[in-house]
Image (cartoon, rainbow, N blue to C red):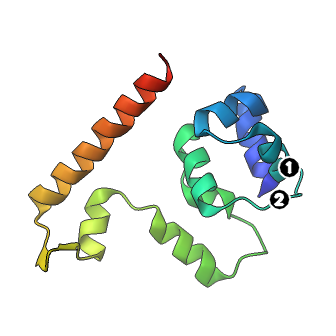
Amino acid sequence: MNNKIKALRKHHGDTLKNLANKINYDYSNLSKIERGLYEPSLELLRKIAEVYNVEMTYFFEENKDYSSEEVQFLSELDLCHDELLKKFDFVLDGKKLSKTEFEFVIEIIRKLRKSISENKNI
C-alpha cells in the first residue's frame, strides 16, 4: 500500500510537501508512511483517493495483508450518494431522510468543501 501512495503521488507529479498540503497532513509523517514506518489511517487514504480521483479499493488491490471481508468493507465505504440511499437508511429525529433531503445535505457538504478549499488558497 505504501508503494501505491508513492507511485500515485509521483504519477501526478507531486512532491511529498505538495501532497501533504493538499490533504492537510504533516509531510514528514507522510514520508514515514511511504517508507513503511507508519500505517495510514482510512481517513488519510480517503483524502489521498479524493485528491487523485481514485477509488479507495485502489490501495488494497492485490494486497495480501487484508482479508476479503476487509477489502469488501472498504469498497462499501466508497459509495456514491445514490448507492448510499439504496444501501442505508439515514434517520434524523426518528424520521428517514427523503431523497430530496439527502441530496440537499450532499449539496451543502460540497459547497462547504469548495468554500474551505477556496479559503485555503487565499
Which quadrant of the figure has residue 74? Answer: bottom right
Q: In percent of the image, x 60 and y 33: which residue is there?
A: 22
Q: Where's the N terminus, which quadrant?
A: bottom right
The amino acid marked with disc number 2 is Tyr
Q: In percent of the image, x 49 and y 25: which residue is there?
A: 120
**Could you say where residue 40 lies in the image, as x and y percent from the top left?**
72, 58
Question: Badges 1 and 2: C-beta atoms under 8 Å apart?
Answer: yes
Left or right of residue 78, residue 94 in this image? left
Q: In percent of the image, x 52 and y 68: which residue is there?
A: 75
The amino acid marked with disc number 1 is Lys
Q: Provide the residue designation for mark 1.
A: 32
Above or below, 31 relative to 10: below
Above or below, 4 relative to 112: below
Q: Provide the residue designation for mark 2.
A: 38
**Could you say where residue 41 lies in the image, as x and y percent from the top left?**
66, 61
Query: Element type at marker 2?
Result: loop
Which quadrant of the figure has residue 97? Answer: bottom left
Q: Work out which residue is located at the far top of the displayed protein and give it.
A: 122
Left or right of residue 28, residue 11 in this image? left
Q: Residues within 10 Å of mark 1 (few under 14, many from 20)?
A: some
Q: Residues within 10 Å of mark 2 (few under 14, many from 20)?
A: few
Is 121 in front, or is 67? 121
